[in-house]
Image (cartoon, rainbow, N blue to C red):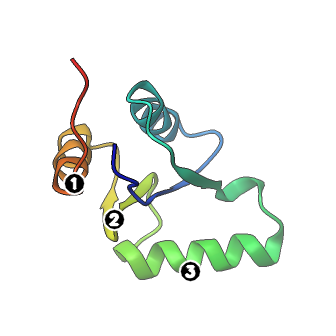
Amino acid sequence: MPEIDIMLYTLSTCPWCRKTKKFFDERGLTYHFLDIDTLGRKDRQAARDKVVELVGSLQYPVAVIDGTAVQGYNPDKFTDLLKQAGWKPQG
């Protein structure tokens, strides 16, 4: 399986953020994430600034798959981007 760069910007209390993590977990994909609300003040602000830079607002989750940002829980878009990056679903 190809190495796909996946970064999630999430909130620990957000149900859609948890669903997004579950989406990647269920497919056995490795990803990095930041639960922005659990960060210290300085790191939290830097992460929030990055989210605004990526998608123009502070709505979560934000998934960045091989450099393309997706705002919200969007499994169809996640799957399309993963396939473009060389991922092949199992089964």
Q: Mark 1 points at which residue?
A: 81
Q: Which mark is residue 66?
A: 2
Name the image quarter holding residue 40.
bottom right
Q: Tag 3 or tag 2, which sits nearer the N-term? A: 3
Q: Tag 1 or tag 3, which sits nearer the N-term? A: 3
Q: Which mark is residue 49?
A: 3
Q: Residue 35 carries which label?
A: none
How would you rate the neighbour count of disc 3 (Cα within 10 Å): few for under 14, some for 14-19, many for 20 or more?
Answer: some
Label 2–label 1 contact, CB within 8 A: yes
Element under label 2? loop
Residue 12 in picture, x, y percent from top left = 65, 42
Element under label 3? helix
In this rendered view, identify the residue nearer to me: 91 or 42: 91
Work out whether 12 lies above or below 89: below
User: What's the CA distance linking mark 3 and mark 1?
Assistant: 24 Å
Q: Looking at the image, which residue is at 47% across and 66% down? A: 58
In this rendered view, identify the residue nearer to me: 2 or 6: 2
Q: Looking at the image, which residue is at 19% across and 48% down? A: 77
Label 2–label 3 contact, CB within 8 A: no
- What amino acid is found at the position of numbered circle 2 in the picture? Asp
User: What's the CA distance linking mark 2 and mark 1?
Assistant: 8 Å
Name the image quarter holding residue 68.
bottom left
Q: Looking at the image, which residue is at 63% across and 39% down? A: 13
| Quarter occupied by the N terminus | top left
Name the image quarter holding residue 73.
top left
Residue 19 in picture, x, y percent from top left = 44, 31
Element under label 1? helix
How would you rate the neighbour count of disc 1 (Cα within 10 Å): few for under 14, some for 14-19, many for 20 or more?
Answer: many
- What amino acid is found at the position of numbered circle 1 in the picture? Leu
Q: Residue furthest top?
A: 91
